[in-house]
Amino acid sequence: MRILFDTSVVLDVLLKREPFVADASALWAANDADEIVGYINATTLTNIFYVARRQASLELAHEAVRTCLDTFEICTVNRLVLERAQGMSGSDFEDNVQIASADFAGVEGIVTRDKSGFKETTLQIFTPSELLQHLAEIKE
């Protein structure tokens, strides 16, 4: 299953944010075990760098970007993605960009802690705990 990780879920692991880190880390483990194929949006990397630098350090920010490049497939953000995102009715442009890039990349779902920003899509939208439950059901 090809899953786009929302920025917040990635940051939960990188910055060890409680109480979210456990479920997010379990999803990273599922990605590492090839139970899912994890994707992030290209612009997620700039957001991760910015947040990690502000909340931690420049060194951690660079390490976080390297970890993401080693861990995830990257969804392209180009003019077509941005134009599609701009045409969506959702009020959060970042979420719209993630939806549009996920569509272009052919992913099947998005994992996020805030499902409200992902209403304008036919992709499956999961919270981390919902995706973990879904993966457990698939294994049975």
Image (cartoon, rainbow, N blue to C red):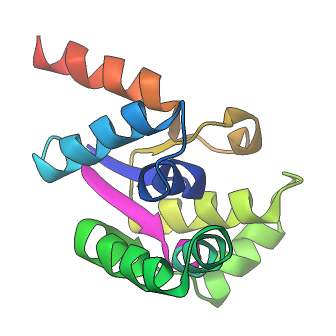
Percent of width and height locating residue 109: 44, 43
Q: Quadrant of the C terminus?
A: top left
Specify whether residue 41 is painted magenta. Answer: yes
56 displayed left or right of 87: left
Image quadrant where residue 77 sits: bottom right
Percent of width and height locating residue 139: 12, 19
Which residue is at a point 33% across and 42% down the rendered structure image?
Answer: 25
The answer, for residue 81, to whether it is visible in the render is yes
**Numbered disc total:** 0
Q: Which residues are magenta?
A: 37-44
Which residue is at a point 39% across and 31% down the rendered structure image?
Answer: 23
Percent of width and height locating residue 107: 39, 54
Q: Quadrant of the N terminus?
A: top left
Image quadrant where residue 121 sits: top right
The answer, for residue 36, to whether it is visible in the render is no
133 displayed left or right of 41: left
Closer to the camera in the image, 94 or 59: 59
Image quadrant where residue 47 sits: bottom right
Prevailing SS of the magenta stretch: strand
Which residue is at a point 83% across and 67% down the rendered structure image?
Answer: 87
131 displayed left or right of 30: right
Closer to the camera in the image, 13 or 140: 13
Which residue is at a point 42% across and 51% down the rendered structure image?
Answer: 13
Specify whether residue 113 is painted magenta. Answer: no
Determine whether 98 is above or below 121 in the image. below
Closer to the camera in the image, 39 or 124: 39
Percent of width and height locating residue 133: 34, 17
